[in-house]
Amino acid sequence: MSATVTAIRAATSSPQFKARMAGVFYLLTIVTAMFAISVLGRLVVDNDAATTATNILGHESLFRLGFAGFLIGTSCYVGVTALLYELLTPVNRGVSLLAAFFSLVGCTLWVLGCVFYLAVFVALGSSHHTSAFTQEQLQALVLMSLELNGLAFSVGMILFGFYCLLIGYLIFRSNFLPQFLGILVAFAGMGHLFSTFANLLSPAFARLLPLYVKLPGFVGELSLMLWLLVIGVNASRWKERLAAAMEAASYR
């Protein structure tokens, strides 16, 4: 029994295992988030509260699945954050911790957005609270709740952009992940920051932005996810970096 426990502990503490698990969680985040966004794209009609409310009532199960997609995706990204924090701590613990804070605050905002998502069911439900509003007012509340959900997601993406910049720096400075991957992730962070700030400050200008402005975010995240999932990290170099970091800490 003790040998089995030792083997499990060795596997779960392995940097390669952590990298692969981070890749799995990252993949789940991307798949569930893309599904949830596609649901909103199918059911929500901009500036048309009546049609949006009708679409949601006509596809309630799909809309609820979209909510589950957002929640599962955010939960999986908390796992990505924790695992990348452990993997990148040997490079610079302070920067890795700061990056994790940016990501976790961003995830908190995404969860807040899920609350606004759920508020749609309150507005469309039948209760003594909703009876005080006209149908048009309730439909307007639905659209407003979804817009607030989008704003919470956008603000979270700003924090996520800073997170990508920080972990891109850490990956670039590490010797157990390729430097080009760190550059791609840093460019992803800059892409997220530029496109999200543009969308929040000037939506009309943001709609004119070409696709390649947003492309770095997709390419950087996809590259990191695939590298972690398929290749992982150089375990021997990671352990050497960890030993050096622990030795340096012991002299402080």
Image (cartoon, grey):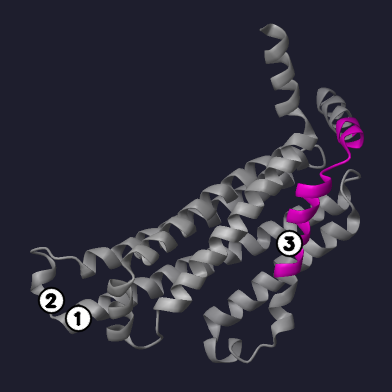
Where residue 23 sits: x, y (%)?
71, 48
In front: label 1 or label 3: 3
Chain part drawn in magenta: 218-240
From the viewer's perspective, tell me whether residue 180 is left or right of residue 121. Answer: right
- Residue name at image x 33 percent, y 78 percent: 55
From the viewer's perspective, tell me whether residue 214 is left or right of residue 201. Answer: right
Residue type at mark 3 is Leu
Q: Write down the quadrant of residue 187 in the picture.
A: bottom right
Q: Which mark is residue 247?
A: none
Is residue 98 visible in the rendered image? The answer is no
In front: label 3 or label 2: 3
Q: Which residue is mark 1?
A: 137
Q: Is residue 214 above or below residue 237?
A: below
Where residue 145 sits: x, y (%)?
33, 71
Residue positioned most to the top: 2
Q: Which residue is mark 2?
A: 133
Do callouts 2 and 1 mark residues in contact (Cβ within 8 Å)? yes
Where residue 12 sits: x, y (%)?
70, 28
Count the numbered circles shown: 3
- Of labels 1 and 3, earlier in sequence is 1
Residue type at mark 2 is Phe
From the viewer's perspective, tell me whether residue 238 is left or right of residue 62. Answer: right
- Alpha carbon separation for disc pair 1 and 3: 41 Å
- Alpha carbon separation for disc pair 2 and 1: 6 Å
Does the segment drawn in magenta span residue 60?
no
Which sits in the foreground, 58 or 3?
58
Q: Is residue 192 above or below residue 1?
A: below
Q: Which mark is residue 222?
A: 3
Q: Residues within 10 Å of mark 1 (few under 14, many from 20)?
A: some
From the viewer's perspective, tell me whether residue 238 is left or right of residue 191. Answer: right
Residue type at mark 1 is Gln
